Amino acid sequence: MIIYSKRKAPTELLFVFHILLYLLIHVQAKCRTGCSLAFASYYVWEGSNLTYISTVFNQKISEILLYNPQVSSQDQIDAGTRINVPFSCDCLNGDFLGHTFSYFTQFGDTYDTIASISYANLTTEDWVRRVNVYNATRIPDHETINVTVNCSCGDRRVSRDYGLFSTYPLRPGENLSLISTESNVSAELLRRYNPGSNFSAGTGLVFVPATDQTGKFPPLKISTTGVSSRVIACISIAGVAGALLLGLCIYAGLYKRKKVVEASLLLEASPDHYIQHGRGLTGITVDKSVEFSYEELAKATDDFSIANKIGQGGFGSVYLAELRGEKAAIKKMDMQASKEFLAELKVLTHVHHLNLVRLIGYCVEGSLFLVYDFIENGNLSQHLRLRDRDPLPWSARVQIALDSARGLEYIHEHTVPVYIHRDIKSANILIDKNFRAKVADFGLTKLTEFGNTSLQTRLVGTFGYMSPEYAQYGDVSPKVDVYAFGVVLYELISAREAVVKTNEEVTESMGLVALFEDVLNQPNPREDLQKLVDPRLGDDYSFDAVCKMARLARACTQENPQLRPSMRSIVVALMTLSSSTEDWDVGSLYENKALTNLMSGR
C-alpha cells in the first residue's frame, strides 16, 4: 500500500503526472503471455533414448510420441534424427518467451555438456551459467539447476496462418533450402520469422512453423501474440494519468487537507478496508482479465440462484454461469474479503500455467466477483470421497499429483516475486474433463521476494494441512505448500480426509500424517500400509508404486522444513513414478543424504 499521510503540494502531483506521461509514451511490454504448446526440435545423439529425453524435458513419453508418428517404438529411436518434444511456451517475467526446465545434475556434468548434449544445443552454455548459482568448475551432483529454452508463439505481422512453432537448433551442413523443404514452409517465410539469422551458420536457434498431431499447421491465436500489449498498457497508464490529473484539480480546489490513499496489490491493506466500486483496483494491471458488470453476471447465474450454486468456501459462494456463450464459474465474495480478492486477482492476472486455474475476469459492484474457467469435473476431494463418483484409477491419481506439483513448482520457482499458496488441499485441486489437475483458490497466497526464505504472518489455512512451523509460529516459506502437498499424496493413496476419526463412539481424531507415520515407521509396514490403501482401488494398482508415493509423502511432511524436498524434486519424482519403464532412483532426486535415506526407507 502506498500511503500519502501528509499533504502533498500540487507540484509534487504534477511531477508524478509527468512521470506517468513519460511511461505512456515509452511503455512496451516485450511479452504478456505465452502459448500452451511449442516444440523443441531435439537432435538425437548416439546413446540417447526416449526415457532420457522425457526426463530431461519433464514430459511423458506418450506425450512425445503423440507428435512424432515417425517413431515406431519407444524402445528404439534412430541417432542423427530429430524429434519434436512438446512443452508450454511461457512469458517469463514479462521479458521473453521461453520455458525453464528443471535438470538434475549427474556426475561429470558441466554447463557445456548440459547445453550441448543433454539439451542438444537448444540452449547455450552461457545462458545456463547465467541462470544458475553454481560455479562452472564445481557443479555438484544430484542438484537441480534451471535450463531455459526460448520459444515462439508466432507473429501476426508475418502471418496469421501459423500458430505452432519449433525451436530449431541449427547444425553444420544445414541451410535455408534444406530446412524449408523439411518443414514444408517457404524460405521467404522462414526469413521473415527469423530476421537476421544465418541459416548456414551451423549454430544458433531459429523458429520454424510446425504441424500438430493431425499434420496441419494450426493458425495463430491472436490472444497469445502480445501484439496489443502496448495498446493495453497505454490505456492503463492513460487511465491512471487521467485519474491523477482529476485528483490534482480536486486537490487544488476543494480537498487540500485530505489524505490520499492508494491501494495496490501489495496486500498491505487493513482487514476492514473495503473496496468501493473499483477504487481498490487503482494501479492494478489486470492483464487479460475482463471487467464484467454486475448485470451481466447476475443474468449469467439466474440472479445468483440456489440452482446455480455449485460451491461454498470460507470467503464466498461459487456459481455456475453461462457467460458470453461459455460456461464459467463465478466466485461471489463479501466486501470484507477484500484482501483475499486482491490476492487472487494479483496472482492469476500475472501467472499463467496449464496447471493453474485461469481467471477470466472480475467485477466490483456491491460484492466482489472473480470469474474463472469452469472446470467441469469438480475437485479432487469429491472424486476421492463421494460415492456417486467412479473411483479414480491409480494412474489418474499419479497424473493428478504430477499436474498439481507442476502448478506449485511454477509459482515457487518461476515467478518473481515467489508465490506461496498457503491453502493446498484436495478441495483446491480441480479436475477437468480429461482428468488433469489445476490448482485453484489463491485467496490466501503470500508474496515473497527472492532471498526471503521464511516470513511470519497471521495463521490462515486448513487444519490437517498446516505444517508444524506454520501452525506453531506462523512461519511461511514454500515448504509450507510442500507439507500440505504431502498430505494430498496421502489422500490420493487412502481417500481419507486430512483429519480422520479414530473412534466413532468418542470424538477422537488424528491427522492423516500421524496415521501414515505410525505405519511407515514399522520395521515391516507392508501389511498395515495395504490396509490404508483406498479399498475402491481393488487390486488395480502396484503396491510398489504406493510405497514410493507414501515415502515421497513422508518426505514432504517432515517436521523440519529443511528436510522437505523442493517442488522441483517432487515433480521429477512423480514423473519417474508415472513411468513404468524406469526404476525409481530416489538417491538421484533429492538434495541431501538424510532425505535420501528417508525416501529409501532407511
Image (tube, grey):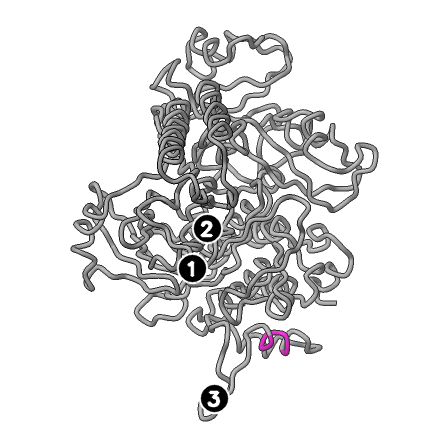
Q: Position of residue 401 (x, y in %)?
A: 50, 56
- Residue at x 33% of width, y 58% of height: 333
Q: Position of residue 148 (x, y in %)?
A: 61, 32
Q: State which tag comes first along the sequence, 2 or 3.
A: 2
User: At numbered mark 3, what does the secondary structure look like: helix, strand or loop?
Assistant: loop
Q: Is 517 inside the magenta-drawn segment?
A: yes
Q: State which tag comes first along the sequence, 1 or 2.
A: 1
Q: Local crowd at mark 1 within 10 Å, few (<14), some, or many (≥20)?
A: few
Say if residue 166 shows up in the picture.
yes
Q: Mark 2 sits on what residue?
A: 343
Viewer-nearest of discs 1 and 2: 1
Q: Mark 3 sits on what residue?
A: 507
Say if residue 547 shows up in the picture.
no
Where does the magenta region start and end?
514-518
- Residue at x 74% of width, y 27% of height: 112
- Residue at x 62% of width, y 10% of height: 173
On residue 172, the disc is: none
Q: Mark 1 sits on what residue?
A: 272
Residue 412 drawn above or below residue 224? below
User: At numbered mark 1, what does the secondary structure look like: helix, strand or loop?
Assistant: loop
Q: Amino acid at mark 2?
A: Ala
- Residue at x 61% of width, y 28% of height: 44
> Which is nearer the eye, 589 or 126?
126
Q: Do tag 1 and tag 3 residues touch (Cβ < 8 Å)? A: no
Q: Amino acid at mark 1?
A: Asp
Q: CA distance from mark 1 to mark 2?
A: 15 Å
> Which is nearer the eye, 93 or 431?
93
Q: Is 428 inside the magenta-drawn segment?
A: no
Q: Amino acid at mark 3?
A: Thr
Q: Local crowd at mark 2 within 10 Å, few (<14), some, or many (≥20)?
A: many
